[in-house]
Image (spheres, grey):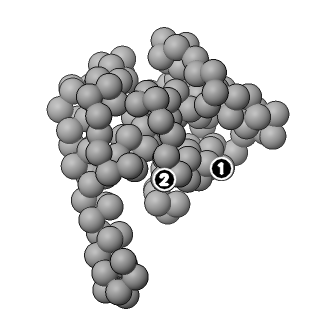
Amino acid sequence: MNMLPDTLHDLPRSERYAYAKLLAFMTRVDEEVTIDEMAIFEQRLGTALLSPSQRQEIRAYLKDPPTLEDCFSGLGEVSGRLALRDAAMMSAADGSIDEDEQIVLEEIAEYLGMESSVVDELLDWVMAGYDWMQAGLDILNLT
């Protein structure tokens, strides 16, 4: 998952911060944070190239999440779309997408002016990616 082609690091720091804040919000939507969700969160937080103090602030949101509306503040079009993609990855990290996660993903898409069908397409893409990664483990007999 750490080879996603994107331009997150090229965006202004304020947009990268808003992106990371939205991902922190997503970790808490289903009221449980799995190891897989945290792995994706930390990897994407690293990609955002925030300062150590900003990373500390973002991690604090894991315990005390902001509102979704607060997360939208500072998001640009590209950072918002990347956040939607990565929020979909985090939502599916535990192997299922619960209804609350689906609703929030659709709210993000709506805020970005995108059709809700984009969420289903992203989730299909994520699951295909997980299947692809599992196939590699199966080839190596590591499962």
User: In this rendering, would 3 be left or right of 120?
Assistant: right
Find disc 1 in the rendering and name its residue.
Answer: 46
Which residue is outermost to the left?
Answer: 117
**What's the mark number on residue 127?**
none
Relative image position of residue 112 (x, y in whole percent):
36, 22
Q: Is mark 2 on a helix, strand or loop?
A: helix
Q: Which of marks 1 and 2 is in front?
A: 2
Looking at marks 1 and 2 on the same chain, the residue that comes earlier in the sequence is marked by 2
Determine if residue 25 is in view.
Answer: yes
Point out the image quarter for the C terminus: bottom left
Residue at 58%, 17% (x, y): give it. 66
In the image, what residue occupies the spot 56% across and 32% down? Answer: 24
Please tell me which residue lies in front, 69 or 114: 69
On the rendered structure, is 142 left or right of 10?
A: left
Q: Mark 2 points at which residue?
A: 36
Residue 81: x, y in percent?
40, 34
Relative to 31, does residue 10 appear above or below in the rendering? below
Q: Measuring 79% from the left and 39% from the top, which residue is drawn there?
A: 51
Question: In what element is the residue under mark 1?
Answer: helix
Q: In the image, is 118 to the left or to the right of 19?
A: left
The amino acid sitting under disc 2 is: Asp
- The residue positioned 31% from the left and 61% from the top of the image is 129
The quadrant holding residue 139 is bottom left
Q: Which of 68 and 38 is in front in this view?
A: 38
The crowd level at tag 2 (other Cα within 10 Å; few <14, some 14-19, many 20+) is some
